[in-house]
Image (cartoon, rainbow, N blue to C red):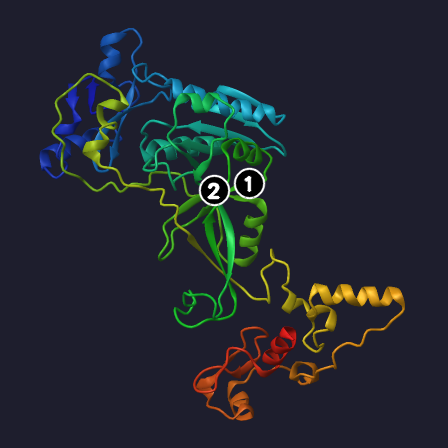
Amino acid sequence: MAHGVFHKDLGPINLSELDLNDRADRLLWESLYGKTAKGDLECLECRDRDPGCPQYMFLRLWKGRPLAVHYSTARHSTAPESPRHRALKERIARAAENAGLTAELEARASDGRRRTDVLVHGENGVTLGCEVQLSYATAQAVVKRTDIARADGLTPLWTTDDEAAPLIERTPWARLDQMPIEAFSSGNALLVRGGVKDLKLTKCDSRNPVPCPDRNYGRCNKWHGTWAPTLGMHLDRLVTASAVSEYVPLYLPAQRGRRASHMWVSAQDREKYLDATTDQLADPDPGHIDNHEPSEPERLPLTRECAYQQRLDDKNRRGRIVRDTSAILPAGITLDGPSPPTSPPTETEARPATSPPTSTDAAPSASRQSRDTARSTGHQEAGPPPRTSQRATRTAPRMRDRAAAATQLGCKVNQVGFCATCQDLTRRYGQGGNPLCSACQEARRYRKV
């Protein structure tokens, strides 16, 4: 990628001098953009270094600015692979092989359009294409390489250590801490800081400090889903789990209040999400992601260099926008039911509403031990006299009509609310209100005896 290119008829062209808002420059650009054949444009640096082996280029708009890009997908000779990049590739391959899988380094496609850093052959036909991106790469380059990988039947996994990398949220990704090369070569765990999330279900009741996300007020007593960062995930584990389909990529299209996101989730969480949502989920459409509106020309001097450092490594001038914010994303799903599918019922939920708490449940452990001793000696210990409670004698169905409940309880309708324990309607608000209904108050007093 460069802003200097050689045209077979016009000679060297400094694309950074073109102002697409100027009529003359725009006419020149329109006469070239999309109308040059392969062989019309050549790389200036390659032309000088090896005239017998020209590297052909084509034109592209990047954030509204004209650029020349190589047809060849091979890395340029002026941007060699760094030792950290090579060490992390070998670490990923070693993690796959330790799990009994096979891995290939620098795997090339038969047509030459793709070269993958590490190709992991998993189970059930899954082939994981691991890309290590420790240097800067544009969003366009990442999306293009991801599209090529998907077209070849690969599941892409990009790894970076830059929280501002453009690949974040634009392809299946994982972010590590910035560590020295020794950390990659050693056997220490590489903690994944971003890119992997868990589906969390939160009960929308009085204990939740935020209002209902569906209504923006009150509580609905349902379960709302969010995507929260996974804690304790290591890169070795993510690579092997993704290769055997324990973790799968999930793409969430942009919605109101949520930007488009790529993440790795467990296969179980993905199934739960698909069962609860009405959205049709699929991979994003291939193509460019940045707008192509004309921008101000940069007026850079004509140079014969062709390397990423020429234009894209000047991060101080470009500025850094943190893309990995580790934020909790709304999943946009709401589930009914007394408890989330992943959590066991609590003691209160498991106990039938029509049975009173028994002495075995209410008595302390010392009293239980004394009763066992009395049984072993043949003496029957007299327990406390049975106490009746409203919960024990309740035979009618729970009240769900606020107006009827207010009439029965002798209060106003706005004073009626749900009991914090059994979710029955009770006089909860105002003077004389209590978060617990009378039956739950009686049961609580009984347990304290």
The quarter of the picture where the C terminus appears is bottom right
User: Could you tell whether 76 is left or right of 185 in the image?
Assistant: left
What residue does disc 1 label?
247
420, 76: nearer the viewer: 420
What residue does disc 2 label?
196
Contact (Cβ within 8 Å) of mark 2 with mark 1: yes
Residue at 22% in and 23% down:
310
Q: Element at badge 2? A: loop
Q: In the rendered view, would you say 50 is above or below 289?
A: above
Residue at 46% in and 88% down:
413
Q: Is residue 292 visible?
A: yes
380, 243: nearer the viewer: 380
Q: Element at badge 1? A: strand
Q: Residue 140 at x, y = what percent? A: 33, 34
Residue placed furthest toward the right: 378
Cα–Cα gap, marks 2 and 1: 9 Å
User: Could you tell whether 346 is left or right of 176 in the image?
Assistant: right
User: Could you tell whether 341 is left or right of 167 in the image?
Assistant: right
Inspect the image, locate mark 1, and give the three-letter code of the amino acid beneath it: Tyr
Residue at 52% in and 93% down:
410
Q: Residue 61 at x, y = what percent? A: 24, 34
Choose mark 2 or mark 1, whichever is in front: 2
Q: Residue 112 at x, y = what percent? A: 44, 20
Inspect the image, locate mark 2, and give the three-letter code of the amino acid beneath it: Val
Give the crowd class for mark 2: few <14, some 14-19, many >=20 residues within 10 Å.
many
Of callouts 2 and 1, which one flags the residue occurring earlier in the amino acid sequence? 2
Q: Residue 82 at x, y = what percent? A: 36, 18
Q: Is residue 108 visible?
A: no
User: Could you tell whether 60 is left or right of 209 in the image?
Assistant: left
Q: Quadrant of residue 317?
A: top left
